Amino acid sequence: MRRLRGIIRSLFAPGLVLALALTAGVAGAQPVANLETAVKATYLYKFAPFVTWPAAPGESLTICIIGADPFGDVLDRAIAGQGYNGRPFRVLRLPAIGVDSGCAVAYLGGSGHQSVASALQVLKGAPVLTVTQNSRSPGIIDFVNLQGHIRFQVDLAAASRNHLEISSKLLAMAAAVKNDGGAQ
């Protein structure tokens, strides 16, 4: 198990270095918030190799930010030059999501146009990896802050409903794995 965690950490390490580089030079209380944002932005594209979609998600792999956008240009800089299975990443920002939005990964920030719960309902059964943050209505992946560290929880039942398979390698890194409402 330790060896597996070491391998997975090595896959995420370059992204964390990028996250640190993106926040360099910021002073005061901002570095912590900016570091958290950079880490989450890095995770958004680093999740892709650990997810199997039922069909190729198009010419590019689209990461959608729905509603409130905590990332700004940090996400754009993080994915610059990155790709997945020969397809480049691209970012699409929308006030609300529909099933036909073309998103492979959707970060649900919620807004006056569409709540997180409403967005999850729209995407129920669609092959979209939903990502939320400390949400009462968590997505397939939900970012949580545990003892000052950004971690994530995975809901396998939600992934299954959306016809997605999550690699055991990613599950090994999760703070918690839920299946049918219970933690494993």
Image (spheres, rainbow, N blue to C red):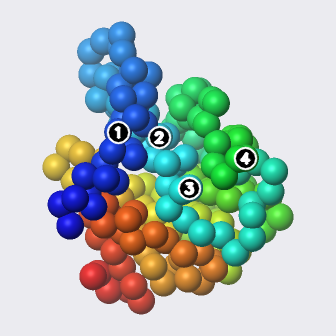
Structural distance between the alpha carbons of marks 2 and 4? 17 Å
Residue at the location (33% across, 74% down)? 177
The x and y percentages for residue 81 are 64, 30
Mark 1 crowdedness (10 Å alpha carbons): few <14, some 14-19, many ≥20: few
Mark 2 crowdedness (10 Å alpha carbons): few <14, some 14-19, many ≥20: many
Residue at the location (29% across, 29% down)? 32
Q: Are marks 1 and 4 in contact (CB under 8 Å)?
A: no
Amino acid type of the residue that numbered disc 1 sits on in the rendered structure = Ala
Q: Are marks 2 and 3 in contact (CB under 8 Å)?
A: no
Q: Which residue is mark 1?
A: 13
Residue 122 higher or lower than 116, as above or below: below
The x and y percentages for residue 145 are 28, 51
* Residue 87, numbered circle: 4
Q: Are marks 2 and 4 in contact (CB under 8 Å)?
A: no
Residue 181 higher or lower than 43, as above or below: below
Residue at the location (58% across, 40% down)? 69
Q: Nearer the viewer, residue 17 or 138?
A: 17
* Residue 42, numbered circle: 2
Name the mark nearer the viewer: 2 or 3: 3
Q: Which badge, 4 or 3, comes first in the chain's sequence? A: 3
* Quarter the C terminus occupies: bottom left
Residue 126 lies left or right of residue 24; in this view the side is right
The x and y percentages for residue 104 are 68, 59
Whether residue 39 is visible, yes or no, is yes
Q: Residue furthest bottom?
A: 180
Amino acid type of the residue that numbered disc 3 sits on in the rendered structure = Ala
Q: Which badge, 1 or 4, comes first in the chain's sequence? A: 1
SS class, disc 4? strand
Amino acid type of the residue that numbered disc 4 sits on in the rendered structure = Arg
Residue 14 lies left or right of residue 105; in this view the side is left
Name the mark nearer the viewer: 4 or 3: 4
Structural distance between the alpha carbons of marks 2 and 1? 10 Å
